[in-house]
Amino acid sequence: MKAIFHKTYRPNEVEITKFVNQFDTMGKPFGKIGRNAIRLFDFEGKIINIKSFKIPNIFNQIAYGLFRKSKARRSFEYANILLDLGIGTPHPIAYFERSKMGLFKNSFYVSEHFECDLTYRELIHNTDYPDYENILRAFTRFTFKLHENGVNFLDHSPGNTLIKKTSNGYEFYLVDLNRMAFGAMDFNQRMKNFAKLTKFESMVEIMSDEYAQLIDVPYAQVFDKMWYYNRRFWGKRERKERVKALLLGR
């Protein structure tokens, strides 16, 4: 099994590798069990977060083995890029890749666990959340910072930004990092990046107002384009769900 560690954690390779090797029997499950699994481990007064990515299909086993970077490797490398840019993310520790007979099998991304106060999702479900609009505007400024630094977070969705309350306001930390693109972003790419966050027009109105001030573009132009990509994304998603329901006889 291949393992690459952040320089800060190289002295701890043996202990952390043990956690990975015994992932299924050690640690505490965290979050919903889906395609991938996360478990938490106590280590020298810290909590270590290990994400296990599922074994891909045979075609991707070949692809990851030959020329594609694994999700764990991308998560690790992108986390380091974000930190170099001054963008918040839980500190990366290592990534592991397991292969067998020339085929890629699975991978693990290891990071420091981060305890947040809320995620963007809380704002969707509770418009009466304390300081609601200020948090939403601060989140928009954070997204603008991503864009200005050429970070296109392709999984910019409700659960993937952790929010921490501080005495100075709010801090934001990205998670689920394996899908990102880097480079200058034009206006359309910036507006499209908001599409997955919410289906509620009122939230788009607030984000559009804040972003328009930051980018110095008229509000109507920002809102129209942001709302266009929003409707296109959610419309496509809803059509898929209807087709799926019909096929399953629901």
Image (cartoon, rainbow, N blue to C red):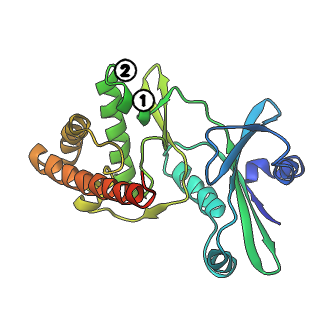
For the point 47% across and 60% down, the residue is 180
- The amino acid type found where label 1 is placed reads Glu
Q: Residue furthest front?
A: 249
Depth check: 220 or 32 in front? 32
For the point 11% across and 51% down, the residue is 221
Mark 1 / mark 2, whichever is N-terminal: 1
- Quadrant including the N terminus: bottom right
Query: Dot 2: what SS?
Result: loop
For the point 48% across and 41% down, the residue is 159
Q: Can you identify the residue that label 1 sits on? A: 122
Confirm whether residue 175 shows in the render.
yes
- The amino acid type found where label 2 is placed reads Tyr
Left or right: 208, with 243 as reference point: left
Measured as percent of width and height from the top left, residue 42 is found at: 80, 34
Q: Quadrant of residue 149?
A: bottom left
**163, above or below 37, in the image:** above
Q: CA distance from mark 1 to mark 2?
A: 8 Å
Q: Residues within 10 Å of mark 2 (few under 14, many from 20)?
A: few
Left or right: 5, with 241 as reference point: right
The label shown at residue 154 is none
Measured as percent of width and height from the top left, residue 229 is found at: 24, 56
Left or right: 111, with 205 as reference point: right
Tag 1–tag 2 contact (CB < 8 Å): yes
Q: Can you identify the residue that label 2 sits on? A: 129
Q: Quadrant of residue 181?
A: bottom left
Measured as percent of width and height from the top left, residue 169 is found at: 41, 24
